[in-house]
Amino acid sequence: MKIPIYSGDDQPAAAHEPGPAFEVSKDTTEAMADPVVAPAAGEPASAEMLVHELEAALAHKTQEYETTREQLLRLMADFDNYRKRTTRQHEEARQYATADLVIALLPGLDNLQRALHAAGQDLTPSSARIAEGVSMVLRQLKEALGKVGVREVQTQGVPFDPTRHEAVDIVSVPASDDGLIVEEVQHGYLLHERLLRPAKVVVGRAERDATHGGA
């Protein structure tokens, strides 16, 4: 089989006939013209933005937690203070509930002490028996008052204290006894640490030489 050989001018006419035209669409042209963007190129920026958003959300929640925690701690402290104050007030009310009753009994207690003192001045047998009976009643009454927290104000040999003592007289004493109580005229009483009645006392005052600035 012979293969026909043609020169450049003798090519068949069919070679010069235009073939079917290849049409390129506009979208294809633009796609070919634009550079191809890799999907991974935008991922780092998106991940960094997401991290910032999460950090901001975490900081906001942390602030809310701290605020709630501080409010809760203040509420707990207020409640604890209220509980302690209520307990203290209840205890004080319980301790001093008998204050009015004790104050009402003090004049009778004073009279028993006066009766005991008067009976002691009489040496007759009948007075001795009376003194013994009064002394027993007085002792029982003091023991009962002591169980509810009543005690006498100390006076003998202690310095004068205006918060617990009432001076009814002042007498001259040596310098070593200046300002001390030398005599008790009437007992004073405390209910726990509350003064029910001050003790009436005589206070000693030393005589000072006027040349040394004394009164």
Image (spheres, rainbow, N blue to C red):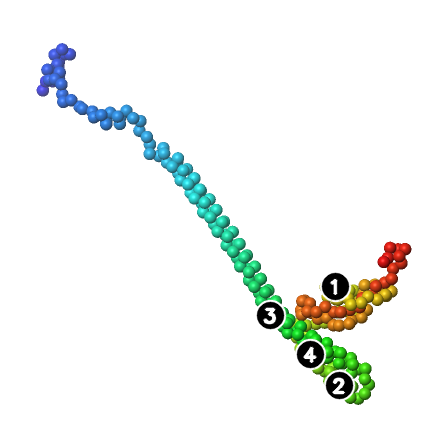
Number of marks drawn: 4
Marks 2 and 4 sit apart, C-alpha to C-alpha, by: 17 Å
Dot 4 or dot 1, earlier in sequence: 4
* Quarter holding residue 132: bottom right
Per the image, label 4 sits on a secondary structure element best described as: helix
156 horizontally vs 58: left or right: right
Image x and y of residue 81, in percent: 56, 59
> How many residues crowd around disc 3 within 10 Å: few (fewer than 14), some, or many (20 or more)?
few
Per the image, label 3 sits on a secondary structure element best described as: helix
Q: Amino acid at mark 2?
A: Ile
The circle on residue 130 is: 2
Q: Single out the residue that lies furthest toward the top.
A: 9
Image x and y of residue 158, in percent: 78, 66
Q: Would you place residue 203 above or below residue 21 in this image?
A: below
| Tag 4 residue | 141
Identity of the residue drawn at 31% across and 27% down: 35
Image x and y of residue 86, in percent: 56, 64
Identity of the residue drawn at 53% across and 54% down: 74
* Quarter holding residue 28: top left
Dot 3 or dot 2, earlier in sequence: 3
The circle on residue 94 is: 3
Marks 3 and 2 sit apart, C-alpha to C-alpha, by: 37 Å
Q: Single out the residue that lies furthest toward the front.
A: 168
Residue 157 visible to the viewer:
no
Image x and y of residue 192, in percent: 67, 69
Dot 2 or dot 4, earlier in sequence: 2
Dot 1 or dot 3, earlier in sequence: 3
